[in-house]
Image (tube, rainbow, N blue to C red):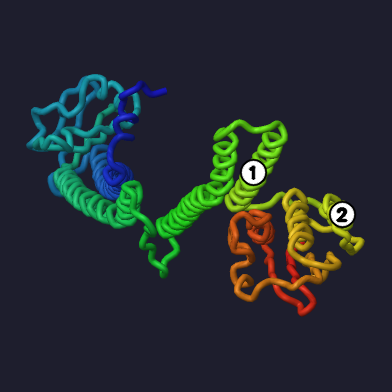
Amino acid sequence: MSLPGGPPARFGRLPVVTRLVLAVAVTMSLVLAGAAGLVYWRVQTALDRQLHDDLAAYQHSLDRAVRSGAAFPPGPSGSLYQVLDARGRVLSASDATHRRALLTPAELGSAVRGHTVRRDVGALLPITPDTLRLQAKRVTAGGTPRVVVAAVRRGHRDEALRELLAQLALASGLTLIAASYVGYRTARAALRPVERYRTAAATLADGAQNLRLDVPADRDDEITRLGHTLNRMLDRLEASAVRERRFVADASHELRTPLSLLRAEVDVALHRPRSAEELTETLRSVDDEVQRLIVLSNALLDLEELGSTDHVARSAVRLADLVGTAVAPHLRTAERSGRRLDAEAADTTVDVDARWLVPAIGNLVGNALRHGDGTVRLTAAVQEGRLRVRVTDEGPGFPAEFLPRAFDRFARAEASRTSEGSGLGLAFVQAVATAHGGTAHAENTGHGGAVTLDLPC
């Protein structure tokens, strides 16, 4: 667990571009270090193998000369040798090492006991003169043990490795700089659309309207998909804002009339003393207006809920039961007015949201009873996976000028705002149809009006 304010926390506060460049730089540093280490190891192994082969060949020739008593052969360029007795005294040596002890007492003892001793003299870095690689072995000459030390200079090998290190460091540095620059430019280019989106979002927060992000149509990467997602979000926000403004406007417009009537009734009642009968009549009128306000408010809230719902909660329901539930409240109304109400539903099951569809069908039947004449007929059938509900009456039908706006909110065939109904019934029906992925259609049949719901089920 990191402490607050530690390196991870400070790293997280850096700009995204900086973090990406640092990540690229660290990753490239590790990759380059690994690659350079591999190259260095391969070259060093090759040079050491060659040096070892030269040293082994020289050692072998020296051992043979000591055993035979022959002259010491020449070795590789810059090679050296020493022949020691068991006490470490130099019996024979190259001119450069005659007085120089190449073995430590411990190494001499190990060689006398028959072990092969190998050691490097001098270091690769820092640069030191007379760098050697030596090998010492015990050789028996005439029954007397001798220690033969063969040495070759490492100057060329060390110089090659130092040059390789310098070249690898330079190449790695330049590659790291280039990779960091490319990573920086790439990160800036990749995040440039995000910055544009942020600027556009800031503009939206300042109150801009109808704002959409400029998203390329010929690309399909993560940033482009983010832009499309944000545009869809902006569409939903704008639609929500439009619905809110429309709700407020519609509510204020439609509530004004019943509230004004309520105020007028109360003012008249308070203007002079009234009899009990007059006060009762005034209260009945006030009650009617209050009921109208309740119905209007409920209708507006239902429309708002439907408009802000992405999907309906479908469930299997028997079509006959659904139609019966929708028609039942209107049977007494039809009987009181001497009208006939016929309902015919197919004996099948549909997958719909009964919570919304039942009141929608009820609105169609209520409108037909309220504004039409004669028999009201309701038919509901399923064909090719679609539910078709049709309500007809035998009245004069819809006025021609009303049909294009029949499903608009508060649209009424009558001009008076005080006429029966809120003008939200057909708007609610269309909202239910749209929520189900279907349509609603109003028409005149020549024998009256007809409204049809067509829904996938």
**Which one is in front, 101 or 342?**
342
Q: Vertical placement of 450 versus 178: above or below?
A: below
Residue 367 drawn at (x, y percent) = 74, 60
Residue at 44%, 54% in the rendered image: 234
Residue neighbourhood size for the residue with mark 1, other residues' Cα within 10 Å, grouped as few (<14), some (14–19), many (≥20) = some
- The amino acid pointed to by label 1 is Glu
Give the quarter of the figure containing the C terminus. Answer: bottom right
Residue highlighted by disc 1: 289
Q: Is residue 36 left or right of residue 317?
A: left
- The amino acid pointed to by label 2 is Arg
What is the number of the mark on residue 336? 2
Q: Is residue 135 left or right of residue 354?
A: left
* Marks 1 and 2, the one that precedes in the sequence: 1
Q: Is residue 388 left or right of residue 74?
A: right
Give the quarter of the figure containing the N terminus. Answer: top left
Q: Vertical placement of 91 versus 389: above or below?
A: above
What is the number of the mark on residue 204? none
**Which one is in front, 111 or 172?**
172
- CB-based contact (under 8 Å), mark 1 and mark 2: no
Secondary structure of the residue carrying numbered label 1: helix
Residue 275 drawn at (x, y percent) = 68, 32
Secondary structure of the residue carrying numbered label 2: helix
Q: Vertical placement of 296 versus 401: above or below?
A: above
* Res 114 → quadrant: top left
For marks 1 and 2, give the CA distance.
23 Å
**Which one is in front, 272 or 183?**
272
Residue at 24%, 37% in the rendered image: 66
Q: Is residue 195 left or right of residue 334?
A: left
Residue 99 drawn at (x, y percent) = 8, 28
